[in-house]
Amino acid sequence: MSYPFLKGHGTENDFVLLPDHDGAVHGDLAPERVRALCDRRAGLGGDGVIRVIRTTAAPVAAELGETAAAWFMDYRNADGSSSEMCGNGIRVLARHLVDAGLVDGQDFAIATRDGDKQIRVDGDLITVDLGRPELLGETTVAVGYRSWAARRVSTGNPHAVAFVSKLVDAGPLTEPPTVDPRVYPDGANVEFVVRRGERHVAMRVHERGSGETRSCGTGACAVMVAAADADGVGRGSTYRVDVPGGELAVTWTHDDRVMLTGPAVIVAEGQTDL
């Protein structure tokens, strides 16, 4: 069976989008299909798959409760596992919804497994309100024989943020960094961070289920919150966060919400039988 797809990215965090508005094409979206689509040699290639589906047809519709969002982001990591949120992915989905005329106006909500997320589209830049961050306790992360202190932060996904002397200190990141399974029973995204200047940091990230990626939206937000807290800046501040695939802006508002701003583009569309 052949079916349509789109390919897009946000700061080179790339995704395969599957239009399946009524949930009739992909069923439960089997993990093996996700893995085949994300395969960079035998498939279309991507850090994850986003099914574009109406909220009423979403596989978790009964669990969402009241929502004003017409569309749901059914997000899967490259290994086929589901994830609560994806900060870059939701901006790519928003770009598609606007370009395809599936939403009215430039301000709208998208439902996710982490609740509704408010979107604002302003030209090439898209801002998503990721809600209230959770600054949790200290933990450690390790790569091989090296380990670092890290801050636990939740921005819809669980994160461990470690400040390092140089980004290369984390090595090639071909394997997941070691985290405490008692703290992260479902795994974690791990960010390695250096300071570049005032309210300016750079990061690398290993995403659970996807490996090292060129960018991570919820990770950039976790990094910003951890840095702002460590710097004594706190709420009401904006940081520039450099990722290997570009630049993101993260604002931690006075009313304790995290706003992620960055580009998102659709680069291809077609048909596949993967």
Image: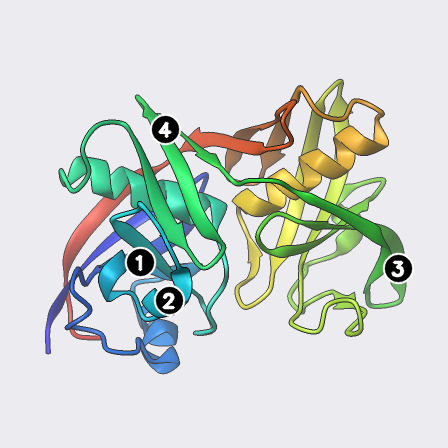
Secondary structure type for disc 4: strand
Residue 38 visible in the displayed image: yes
Q: Which label sits on residue 38?
A: 2
Residue 178 in the image: state x and y as whole percent. 77, 68
- In the rendered structure, which disc, 4 or 2, sits on the residue that comes first in sequence? 2
- Identified at 20% across, 69% down, the residue is 23
Q: Distance of mark 1 from mark 2, alpha carbons?
A: 7 Å
In the visual, does 247 lie left or right of 186? left
- Identified at 43% across, 43% down, the residue is 117
Cβ–Cβ under 8 Å for marks 4 and 1: no
- In the rendered structure, which disc, 3 or 4, sits on the residue that comes first in sequence? 4
Q: Which label sits on residue 120?
A: 4
Q: Distance of mark 4 from mark 2, alpha carbons?
A: 28 Å
Q: Within 10 angstroms of label 1, few (less than 14), some, or many (20 or more) residues?
A: many
Cβ–Cβ under 8 Å for marks 3 and 4: no
Q: Which label sits on residue 147?
A: 3
Residue position for label 1: 16
Secondary structure type for disc 3: strand
Residue 7's place in the image compared with 245, above or below, is: below
Q: Within 10 angstroms of label 3, few (less than 14), some, or many (20 or more) residues?
A: some
In the depicted view, which residue is nearer to us: 44 or 98? Answer: 98
Q: Amino acid at mark 1?
A: Val
Q: Amino acid at mark 2?
A: Cys
Q: Amino acid at mark 3?
A: Ser
- In the rendered structure, which disc, 1 or 2, sits on the residue that comes first in sequence? 1
